[in-house]
Image: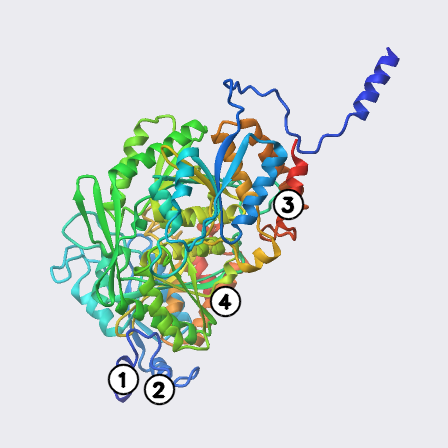
Amino acid sequence: MASQLLRRLIGSRSTTRFLSGAANPCPSLLSSSSSPAARVFSSTSTPITATLFPGDGIGPEIAESVKQIFREAEVPIQWEEHYVGEQIDPRTQSFLTWESLESVRRNKVGLKGPMATPIGKGHRSLNLTLRKELNLYANVRPCYSLPGYKTRYDDVDLVTIRENTEGEYSGLEHQVVRGVVESLKIITRQASLRVAEYAFHYAQAHGRKRVSAIHKANIMQKTDGLFLKCCREVAEKYPDIVYEEVVIDNCCMMLVKNPTLFDVLVMPNLYGDIISDLCAGLIGGLGLTPSCNIGEGGIALAEAVHGSAPDIAGKNLANPTALLLSAVTMLRHLELHDKADRIQDAILKTIAEGKYRTADLGGKSTTTDFTQAIIDHL
Amino acid sequence: MARKSVSVLRHLLTKPLTPAFAAQTRSVTYMPRPGDGAPRAVTLIPGDGIGPLVTNAVEQVMEAMHAPVYFEKFEVTGDMPRVPEEVMESIRKNKVCLKGGLATPMGGGVSSLNMQLRRDLDLYASLVNCFNMRGLQTKHDNVDIVVIRENTEGEYSGLEHEVIPGVVESLKVITKFCSERIAKYAFEYAYLNNRKKVTAVHKANIMKLADGLFLESCREVAENYSGIAYNEIIVDNCCMQLVSKPEQFDVMVTPNLYGNLVANTAAGIAGGTGVMPGGNVGADHAIFEQGASAGNVGNQNMLNQKKANPVALLLSSAMMLRHLQFPSFSDRLENAVERVILEGKFRTKDLGGHSTTQEVVDAVIAALD
């Protein structure tokens, strides 16, 4: 009871301390690795509650995989499972119920499997609902080459941080006259500062040396110019981190020729979408890429960005790597670094060994075999 | 009989050995009209940065080939407010221009001269041909992509304003007129160059009206070309596929911004921007330049050591020669460049070698037949 109060106290103090959406509880309050908050978080008597959205299609199988591995690794997380409803909840205008969203707001961490957006009108898409309701403003994708899974690029190790709320995806379009359509791209100081702050904070917290802002300010002078100005302002507060600005076409070219030139990339919405998918392609596709959405108030919702693959649903063939690596990202956010490292090492070792690989990686194992192999490697 | 075979044998053995890559010398079947051999005037804009270095390379090679082309050179730099009127006059008269590279200054104020040239001459199609060159090792094989990009509207309309301090809006404009003509150009290109597939790149799941209009125009034009396959791909998936399976793409037609990204990505996977030819074309004029420049005109270091790669501009000038209807000169130039790259002795830094621009040019001139 006392430890629960303590946890809530430290939790709330740290949320009010940091500027919108810093990843870790306030660094000044705690020392780095053996942080008391983490110890409080991870004390076995009070496990952390996290929301789990298994999702559709292969979602439930891979979520089961995650739960198993976490259990074996003795990760102090208690899952609160929520499913997408059958009917539209009028309070959220979508198939996600108000209770699900409240659960994420309360727990501050969540893991989401792939969700298929139901077709039809009169409701918001599920991803849009989550984004708007939880104010998820940054999408973080660490992309690193998986040893043992050979792609054409072997030494990728970068993180893409994408602004998730505005930019070209504001959805503000209209037809001016027949045959002429306008679409608005909006950049605000507030949103740009927020994502830049998060990017530098992330870089510092994870020991990254360089942050590159990707833009097209030579053509879109005011919009991307504002984004760059905000990035520069934040860069001044972090003198240890090298800051550079790269034009997006140059960035694309450099990424495909030599991805080691980049470390942390921060970008507005559209460029972020394209570049993060490009980077996912460099390491082997969306089936292996972890992703995490950061929201206001320190919310972190890790998700698997691949589709729900309805054709292999229920057949025990799915590859749980993306969801597992996303769950590891979630653990790092919770400062459970030792557990995160253990699980990540186990996953990488299993893939590197090559004995147990699911069909999409060129092997023949089932989901359960792959999961068991990871557990054996823990 | 034995004497004859000995002499035949001697003749065969003394015949100069043709290089491993032998250009088939066949009789040229192009039948010109009388007077087609008269030299054509071409406007030449060396530009800034490495521009003058590479355009000089082209001039030298044209001299060496005695190509029926003469250049009207004009000095234009990226920081001028507008392209000088005399240059525009010259381009309008000659209809064809070769450009080195014009830098686009960062920050507010000056709008890009490249954009201005494209708008004033209505060069609505930008074309980049990204392909693997023989002898040049890259991580991807079997790449042969042509990216055709709408060049006048879209995200680069330059219509921005500050709503209130701290909130800026930028307009992306898509019109049926422009989308239709770029789609028509893409399919026509595919038809005339024996290409099998056209892929439209878009983000219509998010930008439903704008990219939706673009796709609608592409679909309409596709119906007139039943021999050419047509499909659509979302831009983020497209970039992912480009880095993993680029052989699935043939001709790609895109709006302005995506075209920029896709062209640079495709250029990167096939060998870099130093070797990809391209140009901008409109109904009446054409400007040939390095295909994908990744937004820069080289750095000072490259300029000082004179190590810029002239291959891209040489291949673009070969495209220009074909555009001017001098196909055999074009063939000769392309073969010479291919030979030099295949041999691998003279390569600039971006291709992994140490040569200077001049050395590459000399090698190309030596390889001309």
Q: Are marks 1 and 4 in contact (CB under 8 Å)?
A: no
Mark 1 and mark 4, same subunit?
yes
Q: Are marks 3 and 4 in contact (CB under 8 Å)?
A: no
Residue A377 marker: 4
Q: CA distance from mark 1 to mark 3?
A: 65 Å
> Counting residues from the N terminus, which is met first, the one under dot 2 or under dot 1?
1
- Can you name the residue that lies furthest to the bottom here? A2
SS state under label 1: helix
* Image location (x, y in percent) of residue B187: 37, 31
Q: Which three-letter amino acid code belongs to the residue tagged 3? A: Val
Residue at 27%, 46% in the rendered image: B204
Mark 2 and mark 1, same subunit?
yes
Packing grade of label 1 (10 A; few <14, some 14-19, many >=20) is some
Q: B126 or A119: which is nearer to us? A: B126
Mark 1 and mark 3, same subunit?
no
Quadrant, the N terminus of chain B: top right
Q: Nearer the viewer, mark 4 or mark 2?
A: 2
Residue B360 marker: 3
Packing grade of label 2 (10 A; few <14, some 14-19, many >=20) is some
Q: Is residue A284 visible?
A: no
Q: Are marks 2 and 1 in contact (CB under 8 Å)?
A: yes
Q: CA distance from mark 3 to mark 2?
A: 61 Å
Q: Which three-letter amino acid code belongs to the residue tagged 4? A: His
Q: In the image, A276: left or right of B219? A: right
